[in-house]
Amino acid sequence: MGYYLLSYSIIVNIILSGTLICSKWTNKSASDLSWTKKAAEEAEEVASIPCSGHGLAFLDGVSDDGSPVCECYACFTGYHCSAISRPCLADADSGNPLFLEPFWKKHKENSSVLVSAWHRLGYSYPVEGKMSGELQKYIFKLHELVGNAVTEGRHIVFGTGSTQLLNAAVHSLSSFSPVSPALVLVSIPYYPLYKSQTEYFETTNYKFKGDVSKWKNKTDGAQMLIEFVTSPNNPDCQLKKKVLQEGPLTRAIHDHVYYWPHYTAIPAPCDEDIMIFSISKLTGHAGSRFGWALVKDESVYQKMKQYVSYNTMGVSHDTQLRMLELLKVVVDEGGKKLFEFGYETMKDRWKRLNAIFSTTSRFSLQNIPPQYCTYYQRVRQPSPGKLPHLLVELTTCQHVRFKLDQIQYW
């Protein structure tokens, strides 16, 4: 009997000791903070600056007296961004994903990051080289939850935004072409950066040749043909497939940065050799410059990783830490919080925009039909992240700008 009582007493003491240790760690109050207190107070102070809901103040904001001031959204001005500036133009060319700001302000406790001055000063991680292993785990977990990409049998490459990875993929694939240069192609309409970046970094290994339809039946030549496939497409928001026929020298780079439930239906997981995503379209953190590529072929993966290493020595450790904390919030409850907020916000904006254009016969917006989404397990209405094709009756217009007084701000 005494033996059992002694055993019971030891077990209870172990449990209580563990509880006290955990309690001391998790219940640390603000008054107990030491070296983080100043930084936390500064962040709280700046976040509390009132900008009338039409702007934000930042620690690194520019001011005359050293104090942070409001940076107003488009169409607003004044010390607290309380005045509407007129005339105000709706800039359809802007891609700033600021619509997700309210979500992150609502989830500030779980998503904010304080970085110590000595955080990972070196060039690499102890195990995964220049990529955080924990961040990789969360990216794979996110794709599994959303069902928008096959990750089994894929390697992952981090980049300074998807922009860097697009050219890393071109550079890598072109090195396997038996005849130089490899030709880089794309469907019309396309994201202008495909052309400008490819031409800017153009070498003897690859050359931008534009419209892929002109090469559809020319896949039996000696030159490698590299096709950019954007799905959903920027700018017409269509879910696209590659145009080039299968051949020994045809390759495709699939840009899926908008393939998330707040922008489009997810009919099935993508299963391609090179798939590129970015944080800017997923969470709205465009300024953090972070993207990733899922790559099937080992040799292509190694060359892309080498390109990033030579180009920028990898991705900032500070950025990777911030991305990790953001993705922890995203995957919570299967991503429903972020994706439902983003979807409802975009759907409401398109509803308002359609209402405005419906008052005139001069302009109309491209119709995008509803589609079944495996993530929501229902048919859902479109909520694209870019302005779809605008149909204009005037044949001489080359560039149209709209003065929309009905919209205070987009």
Image (tube, rainbow, N blue to C red):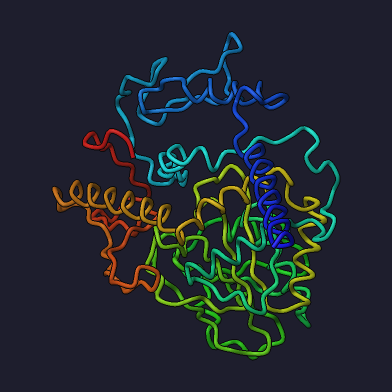
Residue 113: x and y, percent? 62, 38
User: Is residue 81 shown above or below 327?
Assistant: above
Position of the N terminus by quadrant: bottom right
Q: Nearer the viewer, residue 305 or 140?
A: 140
Q: Nearer the viewer, residue 16 or 267?
A: 16
Residue 156: x and y, percent? 69, 67
Could you say which quadrant of the image residue 180 lies in? bottom right
Residue 74 horizontal side relative to residue 42, left or right: left
**Residue at horizontal 73%, vertical 56%?**
6
Position of the C terminus by quadrant: top left
Count of picture labels? 0
Q: Nearer the viewer, residue 365 or 396?
A: 365
Residue 292 horizontal side relative to residue 361, left or right: right
**Residue at horizontal 35%, vertical 55%?**
343
**Residue at horizontal 45%, vertical 58%?**
333
Residue 245: x and y, percent? 55, 87
Residue 135: x and y, percent? 66, 57
User: Is residue 57 shown above or below 372?
Assistant: above
